[in-house]
Image: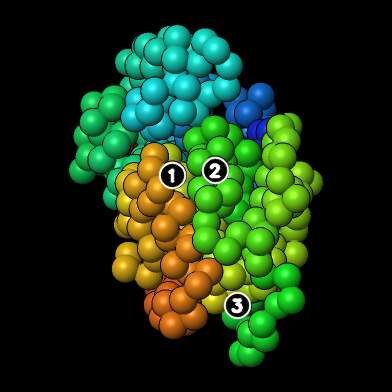
Amino acid sequence: MKWVAGVIRRPDEAISMRTVRESIAAGMERRGVRVVDIDECRVADSTVDLFWDHRASGGHPPLAVLQKAAAPVVVTLHGARAFSLPGNEYRSGWDARIRGAVERRRLLRAWKRIDTRRFHFIAVSDYSRRELSSAVGLEADRIRVIHHGVDRKIFYPLDDRPGRKDPYLLHVSQYQPVKNVGRIVEAFSKITGKGAIRLLLVLPGFGGTVDSEHVTIIREKLDRAELARIYREATAFVFPSLHEGFGLPILEAMACGCPVITSNTTACPEIAGNAAILVDPRSTGAIRNAMTLLVNDGAVRDSMREKGLERAARFDWSSAARRYVSEFERAVKEWKAR
C-alpha cells in the first residue's frame, strides 16, 4: 500500500522520542510508506494520508489541532505520570505538589473536550494502556500495545569484557525529578567498598551539583554510539525511576551486556522481566543493596548479563514498525469507509 504518513514534529523533542520517531519511521519507509515531517502549526495545510503524533506523554491528550485534521490520526501514548505521581515527584520547586494538582485538572478538562473516537491510539506498554484508561476513562480495548525495540546495530555486547581499571556504575537519562537521581547518589554514597568504584551520571539538563569525588556528571547529550560504548564498559546500569511508560534505556543497557537495576513499579517490570534486579525506587536501602550485590558478586553480574541479552533480543524495531504499519493501514481503511 503506497501512501504518505505525516509525523508531527516539535522543537523540544526529547532524545527518547527522537529515537522512537526515527526507528519507526525507518521501518515504515522500508515497507513502502513515505514519511514526511509536519510542523504542528501546518497540520491544516498538509496533504497526507495519515497523521502520526508520536509523543503524547505525561497524560497529555492528542494535539488540539489534530481534532480537525483532514486525515486519520494515530497517537502514541507514553503514559500518564501526571495522574499517577504527586507533583513533587516529577516537577521541581517548592510548589510542585500544587502545580501537579492544577495540571491534573487541566489535563482532564482537555481530554473531555476531545472526541476520542476520532483517534487511533497506540500505547508503548500494557502498563501505559491501563494507566491511561484508568486516568482519563479511555476505553482500554481501543488502545493497541506496541513495545519499542532496540537497535542492535548500535547496542550490542563485547565478546570479551576485560576488567576496567576504573570501574563505574552508570545512570543515563534526560534529567527530570522522576528519574530519582537524588536517591541514586544517596544509595551510592553508602555502598560497601565505594572507593573502588565510581558513579557516572549521563544527565543532559541537570543543573545541580554532587559533592563527591567518586561521582562524575556528563551534562551534554551523547549520540547513541557513544552511549552504547559507555553501557558496554559499565559494571551495572542503575535506573530506579519513579515512573516509566516504557523505559528504553533498560533495553539498551541489556543489549550491550550491562547488568540492570531498575524499579519494581510502573512499566519497568514489564520491560525488564526477570532479567534485572527490581527494587523499590523509593527505598534508598534497596537501591544500595542492589548496587553492592552487583559490585561485589561477579557470578551475579554474569547471570544478569546473560539474562539481559536474552531479554533485549525479544524487542525489535522492525517488528514494531510492521505493527505500526498495520495499525496505520487500519486507520486509513476505516477513514475511507466513513
Mark earlier in primary sequence (3, 1): 3
Residue at 29% across / 25% down in the picture? 136
Residue type, numbered disc 1: Thr
Observer-nearest of 300 and 23: 300
x and y percentages locating residue 111 in the rendered image: 36, 20
Residue type, numbered disc 2: Glu
x and y percentages locating residue 79 in the rendered image: 40, 38
Q: Residues within 10 Å of mark 2 (few under 14, many from 20)?
A: some
Q: Which residue is mark 1?
A: 284
Mark 3: which secondary structure?
A: loop
Q: Taking 297 as reference, is 40 above or below it?
A: above
As measured in the structure, the alpha-carbon distance from the residue carrying label 2 to the one carrying label 1 is 7 Å
Tag shown at residue 186: 2
Q: Which residue is mark 3?
A: 156
- Are circles 3 and 2 on residues that touch, CB within 8 Å? no
Q: Residues within 10 Å of mark 1 (few under 14, many from 20)?
A: some
